[in-house]
Image: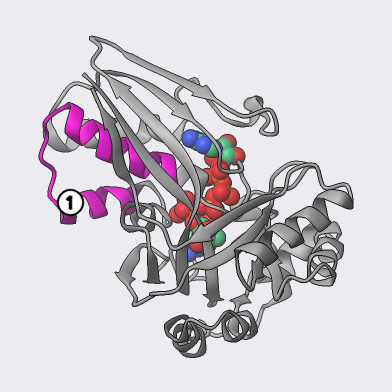
């Protein structure tokens, strides 16, 4: 048997970050949106354990570990231990989400692997247990399971869907010069914001904008507390954001911890125009994606 599960990249429409907790994690109030830029994880029956990764030419294959350190290995080990099962399958991960890009690509793969292996092993894991296992794997992984548009609290792992009947158009520009480490960006946030409040900035205005369906209103309320830290580490991103806005984007920002930058467009045509403009300026990879899209879900079963 072979099962393919697809999981999407995320954008943080709102990312409010508070002062670090005693456990080192930062309290968040975030609004996630899953966008149509997806990784596919395929699992097949096998007596042993193998993992392969394929990438498009614009992703550096060496940036994705394949020898035991992949988050997919950790997801499989955790699910197997939860059920007292042996960890056996042949897995292939087809990546399209930027690596170390602030779009939660590894988290998407972990969520997809949990869903795929649950089906392959006939494990019937409850939704609550899947969410708990996801939270052990990483703060962004529970959202990758549910997708759509959702409020994230705690360290980001407590997720709750929010009403969103809009179709939002995004231009996505992965960095051509490598990724950023999430812990490094949080550390720089701590250095730049020693006075960060215990309670992160709330998302009321952003949630009202999402509900309105109005892209101009959403553009005004997009908010990322990690942007200052990401721009401090990668000053070139500020130039990119200005360029995207000069080509007609309603608003550009750093995605999560970066360095991918995302640009909100008025509609699909505008998104294509902004993408064309950035491509003509010499950015080698410029993608268009819309959201919200579904969380990790089975696409083929044979
Ligand atoms: C930047 C975001 O993508 C926004 O959604 C997430 O907060 C990052 O989520 P993630 O990559 O799933 O993060 P995890 O794997 O849970 O944690 C990686 C590291 O990021 C930092 N981290 C992460 C989440 C959080 N709320 N506070 C943190 O300080 C910690 O240094 C942690 O050791
Ligand atoms: N399946 C995977 N895909 C990508 N990176 C992985 C994977 N498994 C492990 N990694 C490691 O995890 C690191 C972070 O990768 P990822 O693409 O998830 O970053 P990110 O999108 O910035 O994460 P986030 O937005 O959740 O902070 C990579 O640098 C890589 O070493």
Which image quarter holds the C terminus?
A: top left
Q: Secondary structure at mark 1?
A: helix
Percent x, y of residue 166: 45, 74
Q: Residue at x 49, y 52 (%)?
A: 36
Image vertical order of residue 88 relative to residue 114, above or below: above
Q: Residue at x 46, y 87 (%)?
A: 212
Quarter of the image containing the N terminus? top left
Residues 255 and 272: in front is 272
Q: Which segment did they paint magenta?
A: 108-136
Residue that carries the numbered disc 1 in the rendered image: 129
**Magenta: main secondary structure:** helix
Q: Front-most of 114 and 195?
A: 114
- Vertically, is 262 above or below 83? below
238 sits left or right of 124 in the view? right
- Residue 24 makes an appearance in the image: no
Q: Which corner quadrant of the figure contains ligand 2?
A: top right
Q: State the image coordinates of residue 277 (x, y, percent, origin top left).
A: 82, 57
Check residue 67 for magenta coloring.
Answer: no
Colouring scheme applied when the structure was drawn: one colour
Which quarter of the figure has residue 251? bottom right
Check residue 132 for magenta coloring.
yes
């Amino acid at each position: 048997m072979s099962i393919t599960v697809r999981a999407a990249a995320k954008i943080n429409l709102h990312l409010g970050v508070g002062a670090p907790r005693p456990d080192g994690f930062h309290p968040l109030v975030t609004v996630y949106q899953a966008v149509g830029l997806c990784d596919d994880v395929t699992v097949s029956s096998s007596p042993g354990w193998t993992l392969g990764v394929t990438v498009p030419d614009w992703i550096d294959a060496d940036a994705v570990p394949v020898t035991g350190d992949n988050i997919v290995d950790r997801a499989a080990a955790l699910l197997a231990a939860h059920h007292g099962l042996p960890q056996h399958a042949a897995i292939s991960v087809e990546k399209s989400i930027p690596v170390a890009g602030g779009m939660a690509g590894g988290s998407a793969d972990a969520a997809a692997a949990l869903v795929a292996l649950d089906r392959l092993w006939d494990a019937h894991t409850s939704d609550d247990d899947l969410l708990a296992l996801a939270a052990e794997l990483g703060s962004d992984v529970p959202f990758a399971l549910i997708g759509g548009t959702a409020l994230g609290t705690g360290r980001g792992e407590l997720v709750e869907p929010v009403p969103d009947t809009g179709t939002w158009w995004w231009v996505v520009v992965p960095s051509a010069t490598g990724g950023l480490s999430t812990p490094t960006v949080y550390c720089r946030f701590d250095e730049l914001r020693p006075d960060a409040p215990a309670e992160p900035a709330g998302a009321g205005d952003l949630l009202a904008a999402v509900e309105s369906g109005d892209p101009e209103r959403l553009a005004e309320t997009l908010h990322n507390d990690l942007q200052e830290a990401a721009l401090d580490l990668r000053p070139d991103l500020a130039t990119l954001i200005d360029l995207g806005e000069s080509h007609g984007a309603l608003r550009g920002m750093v995605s999560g911890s970066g360095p991918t930058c995302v640009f909100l467009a008025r509609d699909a045509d505008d998104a294509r125009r902004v993408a064309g403009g950035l491509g003509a300026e010499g950015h080698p990879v410029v993608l268009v994606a819309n959201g919200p899209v579904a969380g990790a879900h089975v696409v083929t079963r044979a």
